Amino acid sequence: QVQLVESGGGLVQAGGSLRLSCATSGRTFSFYAVGWFRQAPGKEREFVAAISWSGGDTYYTDFVKGRFTISRDNAGSTVSLQMNSLKPEDTAVYFCAARPIVNRSRYYTGVNDYSIWGQGTQVTVSS
């Protein structure tokens, strides 16, 4: 069973950048699609970005397109989320999630699509 650990969160000024990492323990990321989600206080968890098993297919929610980039290194068992031009409204706890797949080009965007979750990492963007 894959276990996920996020890192890279922190406090940054508006316009700055952070790089979040999601690492596995126990198994590699091969044969898993991965997504990033976030949850702000008092709000529901929402989709941010997703990447297929092969890494060749990615999808972003509209409010991060052009600013965030998701990538993966299956050999190194890491999925990253590069976040640029951060805004105060990006402040949230960010979670990575994974699910086993059989289609190497498939990605998933729903909270209920994923069965494995990390503990989250806090991102705070000051104005």
Image (cartoon, rainbow, N blue to C red):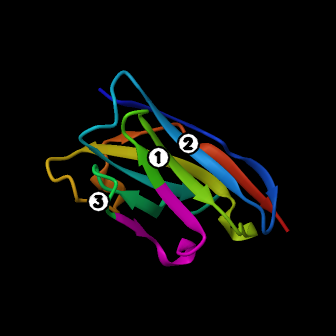
The residue at the point 55 percent across, 42 percent down is: 21
Q: Position of residue 65 (x, y in %)?
A: 52, 75
Q: Determine the residue located farthest toward the left in the rendered image.
A: 102
How crowded pointer 3 is (Cα within 10 Å; few <14, some 14-19, many 20+) is rated as many
According to the image, label 1 marks what residue?
96
Q: Position of residue 66 (x, y in %)?
A: 56, 75
Residue 86 as seen in the image, left or right of residue 71 = right
Which badge, 1 or 2, comes first in the chain's sequence?
2
Looking at the rendered structure, the secondary structure element under dot 1 is: strand
Residue type at tag 3: Tyr
Quarter the C terminus occupies: bottom right
Say whether marks 1 and 2 touch (CB < 8 Å): no
Looking at the rendered structure, the secondary structure element under dot 2 is: strand
Which badge, 2 or 3, comes first in the chain's sequence?
2
How crowded pointer 2 is (Cα within 10 Å; few <14, some 14-19, many 20+) is rated as many
Q: How much space separates mark 1 and mark 2, taking CA atoms? A: 9 Å
According to the image, label 3 marks what residue?
107
The part of the chain drawn in magenta is 58-70
Image mark for residue 109:
none
Rendering quarter of residue 30: top left
Q: How much space separates mark 2 and mark 3, taking CA atoms? A: 18 Å
According to the image, label 2 marks what residue?
21
Q: Is residue 59 magenta?
A: yes
In front here: 8 or 37?
Answer: 8
Which badge, 3 or 1, comes first in the chain's sequence?
1
Q: Position of residue 92 (x, y in %)?
A: 64, 56
Looking at the rendered structure, the secondary structure element under dot 3 is: loop
Residue type at tag 2: Ser
Callout in the foreground (1, 2): 2
Instruction: From this view, report whether residue 49 is shown above or below residue 100.
Output: below
